[in-house]
Image (cartoon, rainbow, N blue to C red):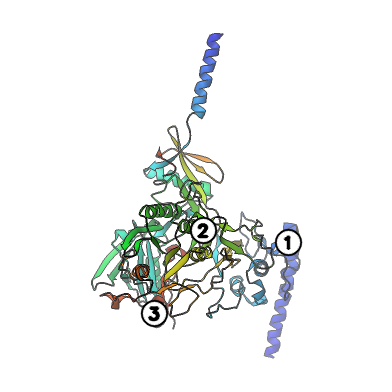
Amino acid sequence: MIDNFFSLVRYGRYVCLFALVACGGSGGGGLGGASTAGNDAWQQGVFPDQSLLADRCETPRQNSDDRAGSEQFEKMWLRSWSDDFYLWYDEIPDQNPASFSVLDYFDELVTPATTPSGQPRDKFHFYWDTEEYQQFTQSGVRSGYGLQLAIDQSAGAPRRIFVVYVEPNSPASDAGVLRGDEFLSIDGTAVSSNTPAGVNVLNAGLFPNDDGEMHSFVVRNLSSTDQRAISMISDSVVTTPVVNVQSYDTSAGRVGYFLFNDHIATAERGLVQAVESLAGANIDELVIDLRYNGGGRLVIASQLAYMVAGAARTAGRTFERLQFNDKYSADLDPVTGARNDPIPFYSTTLGLSLASGQPLPSLNLDRVFVLATEDTCSASESIINALRGVGVEVILIGDTTCGKPYGFYPRDNCGTTYFTIQFRGVNDQNFGDFSDGFSPANESGITGVTIPGCEVADNITQDLGDTNEDMLATAINYVETGSCSTVSPKPNASLKPSPFAESGLRLYGVPEWKKSRILEVDVK
Amino acid sequence: MKTLIVYALTVFCCACSTTFGSKSLPATIEWPNQEGYDELRSILAQALGQSSVRIGETIFSETFIATFSQPDLTGRVLGVPRVFHLYKRGESCFIEDKKTAKKYKLKNIACSVIDPES
């Protein structure tokens, strides 16, 4: 009887579906010209042309291309669009969308395959509200305090929140917040609070929605036992993507260093100035600190790679070539319809923050040191891969990088912008298989593509750019000795968090606005 | 008749000088008052087709270029940002939308010419 009841429900659902199909077909013919009759009915292995299903919305937006449709249309469009453009389209289980919401169905449209280390191969599948996504802001300007945070949300342990980076000339720097500070309470609520109301207070204080919001904090630096009460007012913070440009004299020559945090348009100017300065200092080696750089514009990555390697190594070579799925010719970008020309090593400015067409300076190095963590991602990994592709040795100091040789063309449908992996980036040697990231040779945990280097934890009690900071000190030691000797313990080493990956401390090296609500109640 | 020709040539030359003699040169802002800042934000929002736009206090203060982009959520951005240039021509300051080539005169902002390669 129960079986019969559910059969009836299923049958009833199909009746309804049939009714929707009938209406949809009629509406499509009347409104849009092209008939879509039957295109929204799921049939195993049959994928209607996605263009016939696009913009057929359950709730059409005004002043848009949206037409009357249904959630079924939206799901069927997602399915056909994924089948067209998803990099691993032939690995997506073809499930009937009937029992899923639109967004839940999108979540299903991924490969179930895993990387060699056992991680999901596609961990970058997401969507975003289109209206929010389409808002332009000045490059590098973000609302907040100018902080990057590391949040330990290990199940069963009290939540802890640490400051890993403070933007210069920001509300945080004005308030005296330092790298290595730990937030103890926010607006009177303990950071360890695990009630919904408490978590809401923490989120509201950490990630204010608007400029001009004042919140109070109690902080303590990991190097001290003293607590401080501060308040910060959120503001439009201008990110400085390249900072701490320095050079150090060592027994093996002069070593240049800079911290590069974001591949935004203004980085063009910052990187050129940094390289000009280091070229003027006649450095012999270079350390690029990418530990918190989650990527961004590929052209910026290309320019930096050129400035490291120089013209002789890069002329006529490929910085990165995009590979789409095997339905399309390698010469075609199927999403834009344009020719799929390789991205070169750009040797001139591109007008992003400097007048275009000026020759870039270069250091002409045979090797470069990269300081990295698991938050070194995407375009940052492209720098590593592209330089290796033209014979520049990359010495990796820190931790395994995030493993994202992939990219997307964001696509709106019915008010949601979907991000599904559509291409892989490969270097001049046609290599782009680093879905587990790049790992320093002596990495002890999960490893990706092993390259020369040393595993070192990011010790947030130490200042970035300080030659005593563990990762930079290890790089300099490698320059001098060619080995990864153990870094001497610091007096306050016991206060530092263990290596993030092992302690469960998740580093949020991404800008604050990328995550609206990142704290969650621990239900375990 | 001669007088008329001389007069006409004079008018023509002056007109040429006024129209073509003053070049548009890259410029940076001599920091505006709140009115100027609001004007700039309003013009940029209009050019970008938005009701408002977030800009930094240092916009056009170090370079004549300002870029605008959608949130980078992908880590591997291929698209081209919207680029605006600040120019000075004669005593007037204006911004140019490099995508549309449309120019917007700024009434409440003072600017000064810079070396574009600086």
> On the image, numbered disc 3 is attached to which residue?
A503
Label 2 crowd bin: few (<14), some (14–19), many (20+), radius 10 Å: some
Amino acid identity at mark 3: Ser
The picture places residue A346, in percent across and down from the top left corner, at 52, 54
- Chain of the residue on which disc 2 is drawn: A
Q: Which of marks 3 and 1 is in front?
A: 3
Secondary structure of the residue carrying tag 1 is: helix
> On the image, numbered disc 2 is attached to which residue?
A313
Q: Which residue lies furthest to the left in this view?
A: A226
Tag shown at residue A28: 1
Secondary structure of the residue carrying tag 2 is: helix
Q: Do labels 2 and 3 share a chain?
A: yes
Amino acid identity at mark 1: Gly
Q: Which mark is first along the chain, 3 or 2?
A: 2
Amino acid identity at mark 2: Arg
Q: Is residue A228 left or right of residue A514?
A: left
Q: How far apart are marks 1 and 2 (CA)?
A: 56 Å
Q: Which residue lies furthest to the top in this view?
A: B1
- Chain of the residue on which disc 3 is drawn: A
Q: Nearer the viewer, mark 1 or mark 2?
A: 2
Which image quadrant: the C terminus of chain A?
A: bottom left
